[in-house]
Image (tube, rainbow, N blue to C red):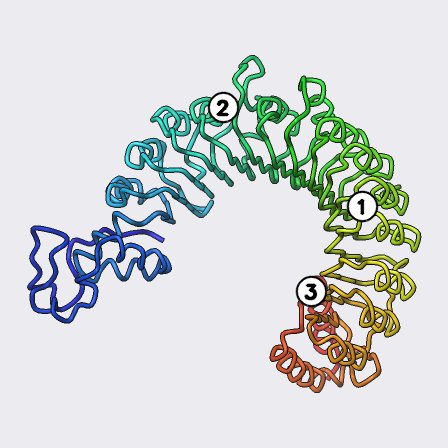
C-alpha cells in the first residue's frame, strides 16, 4: 500500500481550520470533539491500537490527527514499484518515528532504484527493522550505499527475491554492528556466484542472534558467516536449501575454537546426514530445540549422538520421511532420546515406528513431557494409547494423526492422562462419532479436536462417498461442521483437504467423460 501525504483535512469543517499549527482544531467543532482535551501522548496511544488502514483514514480527519499519526507511527508497509522512487523521501520525512519499514514489489514490475533505497537511513535514523520483498532492481551498489549511510540502529533485516548478491550483503554485515536478526530468501544472485558471505580474513565477530536461510542453493558460502556468528547465534533455520550441509557443520566445528551458543536448530528439506548431526552434537552441547524435517540421510546414529551430547534438549521434532526410501530414524533413536534427554517437554514424531518399549522409557525418564504428537506411524495402536494414558502423567497436549487406533484407544485416553487439556485426532479412520461424544462427556475440560479427513462418518459406520451421494453428503457435512463450530472441536488438516479436493475433482471429470 502506498502512503499519501495529505495536506488538507477531509472533513467538512476543514474549511475553517486554523492552519498555522498542527495542534489547533476547528473552532466550529472543538466543543464537540471529545479528543481535544486529550494530550498528544494519549491520542497517540489510541492510534497505536488501530489497523494500518484505519490509521490512514484517521490521518485525514484533521491536521492534529495527521500530525499525531506522523510522529507516533512505528510501522509502515509500502508497495514500492519504480514510480514510488520520487515520492519515497517525502513519505519517510513525514513519519519521523518510524522503526519498522517493509517494501514490497511484484517481481514482474520494476522496483525502486538504488538511489532512493540508499537514502532511507538518512530519513529514518531510528529504523530498527527492514524487510524487502521482490525489490529486484536494488543492486549491490544500492545495498552498499545504504549500509554506508550509518543505519546504526538497524537490528532486524529480511530480504526475499531481491536483486543484490554477496558484495552488497558483505558491506551490510560490516557496517551494521547492531544487526541481530537476518533472513535471506530466494536471492538468485547469491546462488549464482561463489562469493562467501563475510570474508574469512575479517576477524570481526558478528552479533547475529537469529539466522534464517530459505530457498538458497549454495551451502558452502555460509560457512564464514556462521563462523563469525558462532558466539552470538542462538537460532539457525535452514529450509529448502541445497548443498552439502554436512560439510558446512563439520567445517564450522573445525573453525570454532569453543562451543557455539546455538540453542535452536531447524533443518528442513536439505542434504544432511549423520555427519552433520554428529558435528552439531559436538558444536552445540547447549542445544534445546531441534527440528529435523525430511533430511536426506539422518539415521539413529546421528540422533543418538545428539541425545548423548545435548542433554538440555527441550523440544524435538522429527519428520522421518525419506524420498529415496532408505534407512532413516527408527525406534532406536527414540530410545536414545528417552535415555538421555530427561528435560524433554515437547516431542513430535512423524513416520517414526514408535514401540511400547520406547514410550515406556519416555514416560519413565521424561517426567516433564507436556506435548506429544505421533503421526503417520503404523506401530501406534490401542496398546500404545493405553501406555500413554497410564504413564504420561504430565501430558497436557496430545496429537495422534494417521495411526491405526480405534475406540479402545480413545476410551483409554478418557480414563488416563489426568493433566490433559487438549486432544487432536486426525485421519484415524477407525474412530466413531460415538466414542468422541463419550470422551467429551467424560472429560468436559479437555478440548477435543477431530478431523475426519477424506472419509465421512455416518452414524457408527465409515463410508466412502459414492458418486450419487455427493450432494447429500455435502449437506450432511455442512450440518456437522456448523454443530462442530459451535462447540469448537473441529481441527482442519491440509492433507485431508487436498485428498478431498482431488477426490471430488476426479468425480467431476468422470461425469464430463460419461456419454449422454
Measured as percent of width and height from the top left, residue 198 is found at 54, 21
Residue occupied by mark 1: 323
Measured as percent of width and height from the top left, residue 46 is found at 31, 59
Residue occupied by mark 2: 170
Give the image quarter of residue 115: top left
| Residue in the picture at 72% in, 83% down | 473
- Look at discs 1 and 3 and give the one toward the viewer: 3
Distance between the alpha carbons at the discs numbered 1 and 3: 22 Å
Direction top: furthest residue: 201
Question: Do tag 2 and tag 1 residues touch (Cβ < 8 Å)?
Answer: no
Distance between the alpha carbons at the discs numbered 3 and 2: 42 Å
Q: Is residue 457 left or right of residue 384?
A: left
Residue occupied by mark 3: 493
Measured as percent of width and height from the top left, residue 78 is found at 37, 48
Q: Nearer the viewer, residue 483 or 269?
A: 483
Up/down of 322 relative to 189, above or below: below
Quadrant for the C terminus in the image: bottom right
Up/down of 515 relative to 251, above or below: below
Residue 252 - label: none
Amino acid at each position: 500500500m502506498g502512503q499519501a501525504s495529505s495536506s488538507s483535512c477531509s472533513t467538512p469543517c476543514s474549511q475553517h481550520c486554523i492552519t498555522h499549527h498542527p495542534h489547533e482544531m476547528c473552532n466550529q467543532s472543538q466543543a464537540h470533539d471529545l479528543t481535544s482535551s486529550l494530550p498528544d501522548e494519549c491520542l497517540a496511544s489510541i492510534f497505536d491500537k488501530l489497523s494500518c488502514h484505519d490509521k490512514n483514514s484517521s490521518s485525514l480527519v484533521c491536521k492534529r490527527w495527521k500530525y499525531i499519526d506522523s510522529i507516533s507511527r512505528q510501522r509502515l508497509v509500502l508497495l514500492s514499484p519504480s514510480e514510488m522512487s520520487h515520492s519515497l523521501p517525502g513519505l519517510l520525512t513525514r513519519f519521523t518515528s518510524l522503526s519498522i519499514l517493509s517494501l514490497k514489489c511484484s517481481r514482474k514490475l520494476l522496483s525502486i532504484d538504488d538511489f532512493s533505497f540508499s537514502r532511507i537511513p538518512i530519513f529514518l535514523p531510528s529504523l530498527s527493522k527492514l524487510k524487502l520483498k521482490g525489490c529486484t532492481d536494488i543492486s549491490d551498489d544500492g545495498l552498499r550505499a545504504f549500509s554506508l549511510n550509518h543505519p546504526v540502529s538497524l537490528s532486524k533485516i529480511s530480504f526475499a527475491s531481491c536483486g543484490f548478491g554477496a558484495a552488497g550483503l558483505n558491506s551490510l554485515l560490516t557496517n551494521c554492528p547492531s544487526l541481530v536478526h537476518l533472513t535471506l530468501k530466494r536471492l538468485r544472485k547469491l546462488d549464482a556466484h561463489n562469493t562467501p558471505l563475510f570474508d574469512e580474513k575479517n576477524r570481526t565477530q558478528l552479533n547475529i542472534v537469529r539466522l534464517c536461510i530459505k530457498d538458497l542453493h549454495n551451502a558452502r558460502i555460509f560457512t564464514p558467516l556462521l563462523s563469525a556468528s558462532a558466539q552470538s547465534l542462538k537460532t539457525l533455520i535452514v529450509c529448502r536449501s541445497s548443498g552439502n550441509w554436512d560439510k558446512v557443520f563439520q567445517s564450522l566445528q573445525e573453525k570454532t575454537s569453543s562451543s557455539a551458543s546455538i540453542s535452536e536448530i531447524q533443518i528442513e528439506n536439505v542434504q544432511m546426514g549423520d555427519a552433520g548431526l554428529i558435528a552439531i552434537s559436538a558444536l552445540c552441547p547447549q542445544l534445546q530445540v531441534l527440528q529435523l524435517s525430511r533430511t536426506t540421510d539422518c539415521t539413529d546414529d546421528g540422533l543418538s549422538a545428539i541425545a548423548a551430547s545435548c542433554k538440555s534438549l527441550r523440544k524435538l521434532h522429527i519428520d522421518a520421511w525419506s524420498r529415496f526410501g532408505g534407512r532413516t530414524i527408527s525406534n532406536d533413536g527414540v530410545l536414545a532420546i528417552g535415555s538421555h534427554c530427561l528435560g524433554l517437554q515437547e516431542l513430535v514424531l512423524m513416520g517414526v515406528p514408535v514401540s511400547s518399549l520406547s514410550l515406556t522409557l519416555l514416560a519413565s525418564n521424561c517426567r516433564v513431557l507436556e506435548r506429544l504428537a505421533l503421526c503417520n506411524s503404523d506401530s501406534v495402536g490401542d496398546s500404545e494409547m493405553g501406555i500413554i494414558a497410564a504413564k504420561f502423567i504430565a501430558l497436557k497436549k496430545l496429537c495422534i494423526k494417521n495411526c491405526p487406533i480405534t475406540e479402545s484407544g480413545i476410551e483409554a485416553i478418557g480414563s488416563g492422562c489426568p493433566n490433559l487439556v487438549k486432544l487432536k485426532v486426525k485421519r484415524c479412520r477407525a474412530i466413531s462419532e460415538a466414542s468422541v461424544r463419550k470422551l467429551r462427556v467424560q472429560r468436559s475440560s479437555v478440548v477435543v479436536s477431530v478431523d475426519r479427513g477424506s472419509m465421512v462418518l455416518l452414524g457408527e459406520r465409515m463410508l466412502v462417498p459414492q458418486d450419487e451421494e455427493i450432494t447429500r453428503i455435502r449437506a450432511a457435512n455442512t450440518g456437522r461442521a456448523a454443530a462442530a463450530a459451535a462447540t469448537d472441536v473441529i481441527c482442519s488438516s491440509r492433507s485431508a483437504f487436498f485428498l478431498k479436493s482431488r477426490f471430488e475433482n476426479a468425480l467431476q471429470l468422470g461425469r464430463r467423460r460419461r456419454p449422454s
